[in-house]
């Protein structure tokens, strides 16, 4: 038996287990027959455990045979054009390790959520969205072409936005979810533009051109094309991972349940962009300008988040900005070519933040007890020391207002877009008035008027 046969089967199980979980829970929800909690929890835990074990087995197979990347093809899911949209996975030690880590963390969050959301009205909806998320992470981790990557990328964004609005009775949760999805749309547009450009200049959507470790594949792209694609990927990564100037959505995303905050903005989703940059390291090596841009954005984000996290008034926002600090440092490590250190940093930080987010309610309770016993809060002392000089006062104000990013994006992006949309609406109405005659009621029958 050749090594590719068990590898192919193990990868199918690793991706298919969360997809089957999504299918079972989704169909039950559509039929308005959600499974009981004990069944849902057991099914989610067993599916994610099976996926993790399969991906670890695939990692062992790859490590025991050849360390290079392998492109596994499973046919096409669309035959609308010649060749269709191929289902391809590009597997190596990096992709399989990240996919296994993702399913392991998701399994831990699933076990925690089973108790945390016990008898919550949206219990079944939460696990459906968790299954969407894990399926998306598996596709992003193992994608072999742009189509598979884009589908996984969209599943991540969709599940993230819906979980931010999990408590639908809160107007703030719904509003913040729309803001998160708006930022994600910018990143999706950049990702789609990179896919179109890759297809145009290379005639193929295979990610081996971008992620392949052999220099021959990457040299098929010109320097200008490689730089353009790399810059678009950096924009997409910045939106997904909350890098500057797209960091304003991060505190808004804390409206969701604590387990979703842990898996999204503490451990996995916020690191998905870093993993994508790590996979695209060969592309960055042939695009020095994009590499410098990534390092600058990462350094600026780490500095901004390190200052901002110190003045947050709630523990989840503080942890989110602390995570963003490390994400910025990981991006700098990738830009500097420290790929092994970057992956170890990513994996360790994901596990550490997962523990912090899941224990945040207990830590907050203990902290309040300590503050009550002492009689004063450490945050007030930090504020007093931060405002002792003019420079510190300015830094404190900028950090407290989170860099004024909400206002800047509102004026620089939202308001101009709204004005253009209103102008186009008025033009459309004028054109309708000119080319479409106004409706005039038919005159009454002459015989009726005579009568």
Image (cartoon, helix red, strand yellow):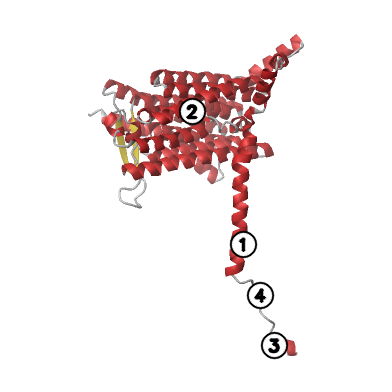
Looking at marks 4 and 3 on the same chain, the residue that comes earlier in the sequence is marked by 4
Q: Nearer the viewer, mark 4 or mark 3?
A: 4
Q: Which residue is mark 3?
A: 446
Q: Residue furthest top?
A: 374
Residue occupying image coordinates x 64% and y 71%: 438
Mark 2 and mark 3: span between their CA atoms? 78 Å
Residue contact at pointers 2 and 3, CB within 8 angstroms: no
Residue contact at pointers 3 and 1, CB within 8 angstroms: no
Looking at marks 1 and 4 on the same chain, the residue that comes earlier in the sequence is marked by 1
Q: Which residue is mark 4?
A: 440
Q: Which residue is mark 2?
A: 45
Q: Nearer the viewer, mark 3 or mark 1?
A: 1
x and y, in percent, of residue 44 in the image: 49, 31
Residue contact at pointers 4 and 3, CB within 8 angstroms: no
x and y, in percent, of residue 315 in the image: 64, 22
x and y, in percent, of residue 53 in the image: 39, 25
x and y, in percent, of residue 271 in the image: 48, 27
């Amino acid at each position: 038996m050749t090594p590719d046969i068990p590898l192919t089967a193990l990868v199918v199980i690793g991706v298919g287990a969360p997809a089957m979980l999504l299918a079972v829970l989704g169909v039950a929800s559509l039929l308005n027959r959600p499974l009981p909690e004990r069944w849902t929890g057991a099914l989610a835990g067993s599916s994610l455990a099976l996926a993790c074990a399969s991906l670890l087995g695939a990692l062992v197979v790859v490590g025991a045979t050849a360390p290079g990347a392998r492109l596994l093809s499973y046919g096409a899911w669309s035959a609308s054009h010649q060749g269709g949209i191929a289902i391809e996975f590009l597997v190596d030690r990096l992709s399989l390790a990240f996919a296994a880590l993702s399913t392991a963390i998701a399994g831990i969050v699933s076990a925690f959520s089973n108790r945390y959301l016990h008898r919550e009205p949206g219990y079944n909806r939460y696990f459906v969205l968790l299954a969407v998320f894990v399926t998306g992470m598996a596709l992003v981790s193992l994608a072999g072409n742009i189509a598979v990557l884009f589908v996984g990328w969209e599943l991540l964004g969709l599940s993230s936005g819906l979980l931010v609005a999990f408590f639908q009775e809160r107007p703030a949760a719904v509003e913040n979810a729309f803001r998160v999805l708006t930022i994600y749309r910018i990143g999706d547009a950049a990702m789609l533009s990179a896919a179109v450009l890759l297809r145009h200049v290379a005639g193929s959507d295979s990610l081996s051109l971008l992620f392949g470790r052999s220099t021959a594949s990457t040299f098929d792209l010109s320097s200008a094309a490689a730089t353009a694609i790399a810059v678009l990927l950096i924009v997409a990564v910045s939106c997904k991972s909350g890098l500057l100037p797209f960091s304003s959505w991060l505190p808004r995303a804390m409206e969701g349940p604590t387990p979703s905050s842990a898996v999204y903005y503490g451990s996995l989703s916020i690191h998905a962009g870093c993993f994508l940059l790590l996979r695209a390291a060969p592309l960055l090596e042939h695009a020095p300008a994009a590499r410098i841009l990534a390092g600058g954005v990462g350094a600026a984000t780490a500095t901004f988040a390190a200052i901002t996290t110190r003045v947050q008034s709630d523990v989840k926002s503080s942890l989110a900005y602390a995570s963003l600090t490390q994400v910025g440092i990981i991006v700098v490590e990738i830009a500097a070519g420290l790929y092994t250190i970057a992956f170890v940093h990513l994996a360790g930080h994901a596990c550490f933040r997962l523990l912090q987010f899941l224990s945040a309610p207990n830590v907050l309770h203990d902290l309040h007890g300590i503050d009550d016993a002492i009689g004063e809060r450490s945050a007030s002392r930090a504020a007093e020391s931060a405002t002792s000089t003019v420079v510190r006062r300015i830094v404190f104000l900028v950090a407290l207002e989170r860099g004024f990013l909400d206002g800047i994006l509102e004026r620089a992006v939202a308001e101009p877009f709204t004005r253009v949309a209103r102008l186009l609406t008025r033009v459309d109405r004028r054109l309708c008035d000119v080319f479409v005659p106004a409706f005039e009621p038919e005159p009454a029958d002459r015989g009726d008027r005579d009568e």
